[in-house]
Amino acid sequence: MKKHDLAKALGISTATMYRHFRDGMPDTLDGARAWLAGEPLPERKPLPTVDVDKNLEQTIAEHRVKVAQARQIWGALMDAGDEQQARAQTSYNQSLKTLVALEAELERRAIQNRDTIQASESKQAMADAMARVLDAWEKMPSICCEEANPKNPAVAMAAMAGYIRKMRKELSA
């Protein structure tokens, strides 16, 4: 039975029928009616498992070859002045668009699969780092002030300690 005849027999448009096919509807009249009625279909063998990312990388590699071939065909037809060059250009453009979409999907998956850090771990790491910074600030007057003002290090120490207190207060607000 032809597809448009099947759609007519089911009382649906061909667009709806193809959408149902993508969702798993069988392409036989009895099977389609059962599927549309929600009746259980006979058991099917499970599909083999595949490494989707590896398969996608392989698909991209194969598609790069196809894009190069489409470009060569288009170029040859243009050079020859063939009237089919417009079709070849369309084919090349569609192939290139598909390749770009496949590469974008691979990149999206790579980003999605990256290791991430939990927010609690991140907060703890920042707290630890800030504690080390604040500890270094507290020690700074006693370490640096003698060099900053050798004649009167206490004045430099008081000024620096005051500034550190002020900064801690601003940062904790």
Image: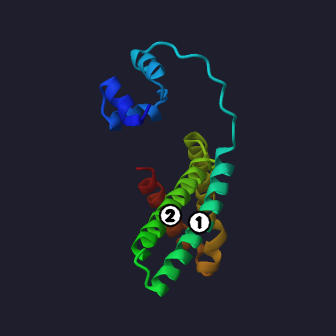
Q: Is residue 20 left or right of residue 40?
A: left
How far from the left and from the top, in percent, is residue 73? 54, 75
Q: Residue at x 49, y 76 (%)?
A: 74
Q: Quadrant of residue 83?
A: bottom left
Q: Which residue is mark 1?
A: 66
Residue type at numbered disc 1: Lys
Residue 149 visible in rendering: no
How far from the left and from the top, in percent, is residue 52? 64, 45
Q: Residue at x 63, y 67 (%)?
A: 65
| Colouring convention used in this rendered image of the protein | rainbow
Task: Determine whether 31 is above or below 127 in the image.
Answer: above
Residue in front for this viewpoint, 71 or 158: 71
Q: Which residue is mark 2?
A: 95
How many numbered callouts?
Answer: 2
Check residue 3 in the rendering and tell me which mark sits there, or answer none.
none
Q: Is residue 105 left or right of residue 1?
A: right
Q: What is the spatial separation of the Cα atoms under label 1 and label 2, in whole angstroms?
A: 7 Å
Residue 57 visible in rendering: yes
How far from the left and from the top, in percent, is residue 120? 57, 40
How far from the left and from the top, in percent, is residue 28? 48, 25
Q: Residues within 10 Å of mark 1 (few under 14, many from 20)?
A: some
Q: Residue at x 61, y 47 (%)?
A: 113
Residue type at numbered disc 2: Ser
